Amino acid sequence: MSVEAPEVRVVEPGAKVTTRIRDLVRYHELIVNLVRKELRVKYKNSVLGFVWSMLNPAMTIAIFWIVFTKFLGNSIPEYPIWILSGILAWNLWQGSLGMAVGSFIGNSSLVTKVYFPREALPLSSIGANLMHFFFQFIVLVIALVIFRFPISLATVVLVPAALVTELLVLCGFCLIVAVMNVYFRDVQHLLELALLAWFWMTPIVYQVAFPIEHLGKISTVLPKVYMLNPMTSIVLAFQRGIYQHISYRDPSTHAHVQLLFHLGILWYLRNLAIVAIVAVGLIAVGWAIFRRLEWRLAEEL
């Protein structure tokens, strides 16, 4: 009686991208199960479960609203809507990168025992946080209803466009930080500091005109450098798609304050298109780095 030998899969650093994509499609059920696992682990033995995903942004906007409007005198109209439209994009960004950077180390037993496309681990981190994003989006919808805030059908198209662009950028970054953290464990600590600085370099809690104006006084180049941040274009598109006030009159100074660029929807879509094109290049670079270092993952883990 003959016994069939188990399938042996050899992963070569030079494997074609099309082959890796076919593997990801072939193992799509594994990616779905990894997303489910991440969600189950996070809310294990939790009474409220996924409700925590909704409480997090609700508490965030409550804190920012109290601090910036009651203590710091911020007079931005419907400030909770303004802050939440940017926070949603940032939570997806921060959560995905924070989970992806430790995805190989946290699943070392799986990586060292069986074959599957290793890209599935960092990509599943994006999937899990995308689920959180949709739960948190419910909080935004509830806030829109409570504040009776109007939505323009002409601008809301920016929201899905910004979301797709952000997911593309995340794919490249997550692949890079996940594999680099296996070889250099300081990457996860460096990422924490980078995300902290990155948050304040993105116009989420303040209007974009503020850094543009002050940086322009130093050098005409600095505002352009500031706009190179991919999250700036993504967050601005989220804000423009949801928040309808481009400017407002400050009641204390009676001066007009610019919240968003007074430009057409095509300007925001153009910026997203540029970021998306760069993101495709980043994915190619991230995949190249990943393929070069993948063969030693089990040994390093």
Image (tube, rainbow, N blue to C red):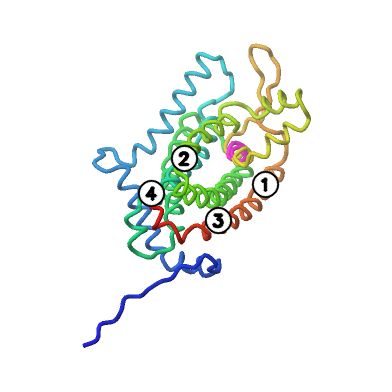
Could you say which is closer to the camera, residue 241 or residue 165? 165
Disc 4 marks which amino acid? Answer: Ile
Which secondary structure lies at badge 3?
helix
Q: Earlier in the sequence, mark 3 or mark 2?
A: 2
Q: Earlier in the sequence, mark 4 or mark 1?
A: 4
Magenta stretch mostly in which secondary structure?
helix
Mark 4, residue position: 105
Left or right position of 164 against 91: right
Q: Position of residue 243 (x, y in %)?
A: 59, 34
For label 4, count other residues whose C-alpha is less than 10 Å away and answer few (under 14), some (14-19) or many (20+).
Answer: some
Q: CA distance from mark 4 to mark 2?
A: 13 Å
Could you say which is closer to the camera, residue 51 or residue 182? 182
Residue at the image position 37 percent from the left and 58 percent from the top: 111
Mark 1, residue position: 269
Q: Which residues are magenta?
A: 235-240
Which secondary structure lies at badge 1?
helix
Q: CA distance from mark 4 to mark 1?
A: 38 Å
Residue at the image position 24 percent from the left and 41 percent from the top: 45
Could you say which is closer to the camera, residue 42 or residue 264? 42
**Quarter-of-image position of residue 260:** top right
Which secondary structure lies at badge 4?
helix
**Residue lying furthest top in this view?**
252
Q: Foreground mark, 4 or 2?
A: 2
Residue at the image position 48 percent from the left and 44 percent from the top: 97
Mark 3, residue position: 289
Q: CA distance from mark 3 to mark 4?
A: 18 Å
Q: Does 160 appear in magenta? A: no
For label 1, count other residues whose C-alpha is less than 10 Å away and answer few (under 14), some (14-19) or many (20+).
Answer: some
Q: CA distance from mark 3 to mark 1?
A: 30 Å
Q: CA distance from mark 1 to mark 2?
A: 36 Å
